Image: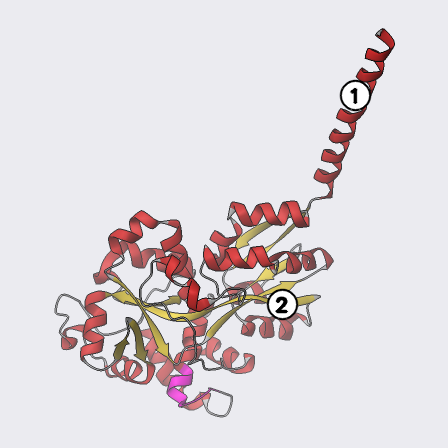
């Protein structure tokens, strides 16, 4: 009996040791990758469910530093495994400056939209700059740009409670992706099509004039959106941002959203541009992030909790859970962004 107990004790010890060894081995196998990411993706990367899938299924953890898309691809990347900017133009700029990366892949998309308050949206509709159909608001970029260039005041639209002229608040286009993309969208509008090296120089003075009216610009899309929500209609009547920002906010802050949802309006520019969030692997370790981020469960979380359009969902059946009115099932009126060479010209002109 004593011998049997000793044997069971040894067996138990072996099992405990084996479990501990497996745990230690698994712990040692986890790879940490680090890089720069746009601020609009921080909520996604900090999502515990996303982190759990990356850790348990792919033995991967992600360390990151927030940076503007243009800054990250044009700056020093020493010691970084990846970059995660918010458009393909950033990838083109990276390739011009550093050559082809080890690997790159679009992880998800979101359109550029405008955000405003209900009173402003109603005024824009009344004067024909915007329109509303089945609860979805669209804004005519040609008409909006004309009013900005003319220096039309908010009071001329009937918004006597607002100071100054019509502008669209945006991030600094020389640093941040949302501002950069909005600059590209305005350049397209001024050119009457897609801006390129043949037509951009003719409209550059007008583009510069539009952005000079904005004064101080935030360097981060997340900071601008946060200020829009906190400071009210008087401070930021109309801003450019990502569709995903409002969807993520509504999911993460349901109580706050229920209080302000009747006053926040999302308008889709006609046309708009896609913000394609492209992951750029700078080394072999960085490539491990691509498969992990394209995991079907991770992609599902990216849409359902953070509002990024990923293509793994049934849009027509899946927009209601956000509780955000005016959300388009499908984005159809999309214009191409100007190419990297043209965006370089635009960025330099707006510095």
* Extreme residue in the top direction: 2
Camera sees residue 171: no
Q: Sequence order check: which comes first, mark 2 or mark 1?
A: 1
Q: Which residues are magenta?
A: 187-195
Dot 2 surroundings within 10 Å: few (below 14), some, or many (20 or more)? some
Camera sees residue 285: yes
In depth, the one of 307 and 281 nearer the eye is: 307
In depth, the one of 167 and 345 nearer the eye is: 167
Please state the horizontal and vertical placement of residue 127, each as a whole percent of the image: 19, 81
Residue at point 40%, 63% (across, down): 319
Q: Identify residue for label 2.
A: 105
Classify residue 73 by image quadrant.
bottom right
Classify residue 15 by image quadrant.
top right
Disc 2 is placed on an element classified as strand
Q: Identify residue for label 1.
A: 13
Image quarter hosting the N terminus: top right
Image quarter hosting the C terminus: bottom left
Residue at point 84%, 7% (across, down): 2
Dot 1 surroundings within 10 Å: few (below 14), some, or many (20 or more)? few
**In this figure, what is the number of numbered marks?**
2
Please state the horizontal and vertical placement of residue 285, each as a whole percent of the image: 71, 55
- CA gap, disc 2 to disc 1? 47 Å
Q: Is residue 161 magenta?
A: no
In depth, the one of 321 and 103 nearer the eye is: 321
Residues at discs 2 and 1 in contact (Cβ within 8 Å): no
In depth, the one of 164 and 191 nearer the eye is: 191
Q: Which mark is residue 235?
A: none
């Amino acid at each position: 009996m004593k011998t049997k107990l000793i044997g069971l004790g040894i067996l138990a010890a072996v099992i405990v040791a084996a479990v501990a060894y497996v745990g230690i081995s698994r712990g040692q196998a986890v790879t940490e990758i680090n890089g720069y990411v746009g601020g609009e993706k921080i909520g996604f990367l900090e999502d515990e469910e996303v982190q759990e899938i990356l850790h348990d299924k792919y033995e991967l953890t992600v360390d990151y530093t927030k940076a503007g898309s243009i800054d990250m691809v044009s700056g020093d990347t020493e010691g970084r495994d990846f970059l995660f900017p918010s458009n393909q133009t950033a990838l083109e700029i990276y390739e011009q400056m550093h050559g082809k990366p080890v690997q790159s892949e679009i992880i998800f998309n979101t359109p550029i939209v405008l955000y405003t308050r209900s009173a402003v949206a109603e005024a824009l509709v009344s004067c024909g700059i915007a329109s509303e159909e089945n609860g979805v608001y669209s804004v005519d970029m040609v008409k909006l740009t004309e009013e900005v260039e003319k220096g039309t005041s908010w009071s001329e639209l009937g918004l006597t409670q607002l100071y100054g002229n019509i502008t669209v608040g945006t991030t600094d286009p020389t640093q941040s992706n949302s501002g950069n993309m909005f600059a590209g969208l305005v350049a397209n509008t001024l050119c009457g099509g897609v801006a390129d090296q043949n037509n951009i120089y003719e409209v550059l003075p007008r583009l510069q004039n539009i952005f000079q009216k904005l004064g101080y610009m935030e360097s981060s899309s997340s900071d601008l959106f946060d200020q829009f929500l906190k400071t009210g209609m008087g401070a930021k009547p109309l801003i450019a941002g990502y569709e995903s920002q409002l969807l993520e906010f509504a999911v993460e802050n349901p109580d706050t959203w229920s209080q302000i949802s009747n006053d926040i309006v999302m308008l889709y520019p006609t046309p708009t541009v896609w913000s394609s969030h492209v992951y750029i692997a700078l080394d072999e370790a960085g490539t491990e992030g691509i498969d992990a981020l394209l995991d079907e469960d991770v992609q599902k979380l990216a849409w359902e909790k953070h509002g990024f359009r990923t293509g793994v969902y049934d849009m027509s059946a899946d927009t209601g859970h956000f509780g955000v009115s005016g959300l388009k099932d499908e984005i159809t009126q999309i214009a191409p962004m100007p190419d990297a060479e043209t965006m370089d010209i635009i960025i330099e002109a707006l510095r």
